[in-house]
Amino acid sequence: MALFTWRQLAIPEPLLDLRAFGYRIFRISVLIMIIVMMAMFAAMMLLPIFLQNALDYTPLKAGLVMLPGGVIMGIMSPVTGRLFDKFGAKWLAIAGLTLIGNTLWQFAHITLSTSYSTIMLFNTLLMLGISMLMMPVMTNALNELPPPMYPHGTAIIGTLQQVAGAVGTALLVTVMMNGSRKYLEHPLSGQDESALQALALIAGMKNASLLAFGLVAVAWVASFFLKRAHGPEQKRAAKQVSPG
């Protein structure tokens, strides 16, 4: 990574122009998107595993838990665009990250008695929070860049989103499995094997959700430093009305 970064800064026509990180709003926005993508991909991986292995749901039933969240993300796309035009990215990011953080906190306190509809609601609220901030934050980040750097900014964001999803999944699944393993090392007495495995997965899910909550808390603090960046049309209009 260090060699790649040095190489891209040294050559006249870089594959990814990392000078985009010289723009403050772009840096903050990318940090927020990385954390959100880690949380989203990890939830998409962890939740079905947990539902099938701990709560004994069928693959179909576990998959249907994810369905309303996907529908909400599709519905929210045009709505979020209008909200972004009216309020900007900062307050949408704060609201979305607050919702995501609260949902992850609830995931950390799931028990064997948590109902199917409650888990579905939690996942839907998680996806609602993600849909509230991903497009506005990305658009605001690109608006901060000069037009010649738009392709590089888009490529950087797309690349880091995929990397963040892979790293987040690996990290949180590892935390979940380690939490389950540690629980099994010191089990409570009087539990049968199936109940023990389920409780171990709940312990692992709690650890992973709390870690994701901590990462989202960092993004939530960073979102207060966002400022509204103007696109090329607004910048041209401002130049036309400015003196001289």
Image (cartoon, rainbow, N blue to C red):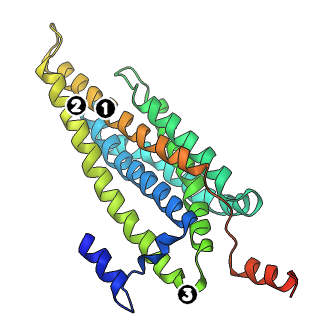
Tell me residue 115's x, y (percent). 44, 26
Q: 156 above or below 42? A: below
Q: How far apart are marks 1 and 2 (CA)?
A: 6 Å
| Mark 3 / mark 1, whichever is N-terminal | 3
Please state if 140 lies on the left or on the right of 4 as rendered. Answer: right
Are the residues tagged 1 and 2 within 8 Å (C-beta)? yes
- Decide: few, some or many residues near mark 2? Use Cα within 10 Å; few <14, some 14-19, many ≥20: many
As shown in the figure, which amino acid type bears the numbered disc 3?
Pro
Q: Camera-side residue: 74 or 204?
A: 204
Q: How far apart are marks 2 and 3 (CA)?
A: 47 Å
Q: Distance between the residues labelled 3 and 1?
A: 43 Å
As shown in the figure, which amino acid type bears the numbered disc 2?
Gly
Residue indicated by mark 1: 207
Specify the label residue 148 is tagged with.
Answer: 3
| Mark 2 / mark 3, whichever is N-terminal | 3
Q: In which quarter of the image is the C terminus?
A: bottom right
- Element type at mark 3: helix
Tell me residue 195's x, y (percent). 21, 19
